[in-house]
Image (cartoon, helix red, strand yellow):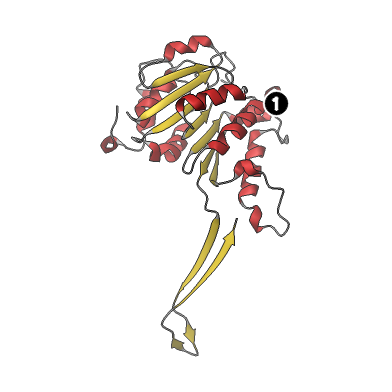
Amino acid sequence: MGMCRGRQVRGRLRGRNNVGDLWQSFMENQDEVIDKWRHYFPAYERHFETWRDRSLVFLEIGVSKGGSLKMWQRYFGPYATVVGIDVDSKCREFESPGVHVRIGSQSDLAFLDTVVDEFGIPDAVLDDGSHHMDDVIATFEHLYPLMSSNSVYVVEDLHTGFLEEYGGGADSPRNFLNYAHEGVMQMNRHWARVPAEHSPVFDDTRSISFYDSLVFFEKGSPRTLVADQVGRVKVRGVRSRGATRTHTVVR
């Protein structure tokens, strides 16, 4: 949890792809240290499952002690490119085949662009970096709009959002939990008689899932929503051959 600078808040194939694999990999780790809350693992596996044993770019913001990079490589499999970024140059020592480390701040958008230029737009992002709300929001607003359908973006350790020293506060709009709730409203703004002001950063969001200190965003929402009514109806006691009705809403 957290960047290597100390701002912390506290080889498989599809045939062996079982629920709990990531937790087992964590518990059996004999490489560099991994620091994670236990309750994160079911959520990780629920949202990252579809990316296993597929070609993907996985970006972890905050390398810390280095062990999680290899854990993610074991979990996602041999086709994954795992990239970690951190402000501490010592984190370069955690590089290995298929695991890359680049040194820079998540708040430096030009630096983020160099990472994207080198490795491609990430398919999955895990923000376990500075945990400062300004950094978290700036990084999200820069990277998330670039990501394609079915991509996953997760921010963790969001208990920091309640702490003023991390730029948050329970009722602060900079608390990322409150910010993400605004994303829920944006996903559903087309239903309002007077829609809220459009915030394009949340465009194409399929779902936003909240857990304790953890939020997942998944992309791939359809532009057009269609509701179908199908089945047989009775007219004066006589069953018809069938009826259908379609209602369409453009988001």
- Residue nearer the viewer, 148 or 212: 148
Give the x, y percent position of residue 8. 57, 19
Q: Residues within 10 Å of mark 1 (few under 14, many from 20)?
A: some
Residue ID at (51%, 43%): 219
Give the x, y percent position of residue 164. 72, 25
Position of 97 relative to 156 (above/below):
above
Position of 225 relative to 12 (above/below):
below
Q: Which residue is mark 1?
A: 167
Q: Is residue 68 visible?
A: yes
Residue ID at (56%, 15%): 87
Give the x, y percent position of residue 217. 54, 40
* The quadrant where residue 14 appears: top left
Mark 1 element type:
loop
Q: Is residue 17 left or right of residue 186?
A: left
Q: Is residue 129 visible?
A: no
Return the residue found at the far front. Answer: 117
- Residue nearer the viewer, 174 or 116: 116
Q: Is residue 177 left or right of residue 35?
A: right
Residue ID at (57%, 38%): 145
What is the total number of numbered labels drawn onto the structure image? 1
Identified by mark 1, the residue type is Gly
- Residue nearer the viewer, 140 or 120: 120
Give the x, y percent position of residue 251. 60, 55
Residue ID at (50%, 47%): 220
